[in-house]
Image (tube, grey):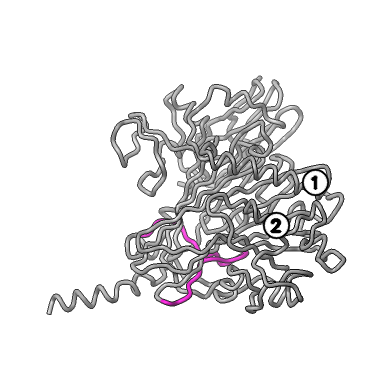
Amino acid sequence: MARFATFLLLLASPALAQTPGNCAPGTASADLDISDVRATLLTNGNLFHGQAETGYLSDAYVVPKGSGNTAIYGASLWVGGTVDDELRMSGATFVNFELWPGPLENGAALPNPDDCSAYDRIWVVSTLDVAAYDETGEATDDLAEWPVDLGAEVIDGDGVSGNFNLEGGDRPRIYGSQTAFWVMNDVGNEHAYSKSNPIGLEVQANAFAISSTEAALDQATFYRFRLINRNMLPLEDARFSIWADTDIGGNREEHEGVDTTRSLGYYYKSLEKDPLYGIPPAAGFDFLSDGLGAFHYALNAAGPIGDPRGKLEMDRVQRGLWSDGTPLTAHGNGYLTDGPVTVWAFPGDPATGECWSDVNNCGGGSNPSGNHRIIPTAPVFSLQPGESRTFDIALLFAQGTDNLDSITELRAASDLVQAAYDDGSLFDSRLPVANEDSIQPRTNHIGTVYPNPFRSQATVPFEVAAPGRVRLSVVDVLGREVAVLAEGEVAAGSHRAVLDGSRLASGVYLVVLEADGQRQSTRALLLR
């Protein structure tokens, strides 16, 4: 009888493991800001926009850093496929994000079904942090607490695998100049946007930036998403996509296209002059590892050419169809045209006026520009229980002599990045290099406080373009100065100060940098 009961339990366990938890959405955020980009990261399945501890974030991908100009509004991760012949999806657009903080146990079980907040954190470390530790013995919280137990990679220095012993010589595996790591899952709560049952996915995320004199690298950010099937059933006929609301320099006059030879889905402006950027730039997602299997787009409109809603419409778009199931057809806008069926929206080169592109729709004209989205999708894959798959992606930016030349420059950036990826140098982990501090900042800039929120101490990075006097102070919500972190003459370059919260009350503070007649600030949240 006991053996029969155990057998019934094993049969029931996959269904039980797929039951959503009651976790609150993740609100932790952190910035990549060591290069000429400030890119905000969050723990709820989206990039650059969404709910965070300090409110709703938007316009959080700034390039050049400090310019206030944004190259993308936001993006969300989409993963869909079949589990036991049932279509399941994790993904959203602007709200109801479908990833939650933290890992999954085998069987797709949450460590705590009612609370994921223990994992609502993004760890950020840089080569400068490691160099400072080697010199002073003082470590940032994220460096000291690098989460090897959650899957963060380590360069072994103490000869003991599977641990992280900073004093013993272990170091975080830092890609580029600054690396972020966090973990998410799709079981934390109901899937309100896709109306799907959870897949049982754990997502281990790395993002990094490279401080470089090469603009293609300095104005790019890089992402590694490792998908792990924690379900007891296989995930089949699966697809990984990035849905992105592009809004480069604003949310109008947008075009898009795909370079199938480079696996580059990109977006650009129809304008000859952009109100924010001047010369309109181009940007796009370069799928470095597996390439692309389809590239679609959507309009800010109702109906089959607008944003897909629900798992069935999302799945269709991932497959290169319109959300009503109509095939994408070349020519015109791609909906119900007389062109051949395709899964590639606008693969023609707009820089040369090639058909089929937004500037040459094969009908003797160009397509209307507007507020558009893009959905680049990797080729189909499957994951057995416990199996993982990694997707490596670059978000590239380029500015040429005009809006179409910016696309040409973007392709050149793609070639440089892909070559570095293929020869292993792009994802080659880095230790501090002697000339890291020699890269001079373009403007005075105060970086993001990290960790943020913090409980005891936090680090405040800042950059000074030229030697001179600076003042770095802390102000409370009433405008009262409560601390001075730095004051006096400093050299040009990157610096950091320590914000000691031991004598401060919990709450939001403003950290203010004054240098060369300029005043910049950033927020810090102290929690007890």
In-image side of 388 versus 220 (left or right) = left
Tell me if residue 111 is in the magenta stretch: no
Indicate the amino acid at tag 2: Thr
Please tell me which residue lies in front, 342 or 525: 342
Q: How would you rate the neighbour count of disc 1 (Cα within 10 Å): few for under 14, some for 14-19, many for 20 or more?
A: many
Q: Residue at x 62, y 51 (%)?
A: 286
Q: Earlier in the sequence, mark 1 or mark 2?
A: 2
Q: Looking at the picture, how far across and down is residue 514, in whole percent?
A: 70, 31
Labels 1 and 2 touching (C-beta < 8 A): no
**320 above or below 166?**
below
Which quarter of the rendered picture does the N terminus lie within?
A: bottom left
Range of magenta residues: 85-104
* Secondary structure predominantly adopted by residues drawn in magenta: loop
In-image side of 245 versus 171 (left or right) = right
Q: Secondary structure under badge 1?
A: helix
Q: How would you rate the neighbour count of disc 2 (Cα within 10 Å): few for under 14, some for 14-19, many for 20 or more?
A: many
Q: Which mark is residue 246?
A: 2
Please tell me which residue lies in front, 511 or 503: 511
Q: Which mark is residue 405?
A: 1
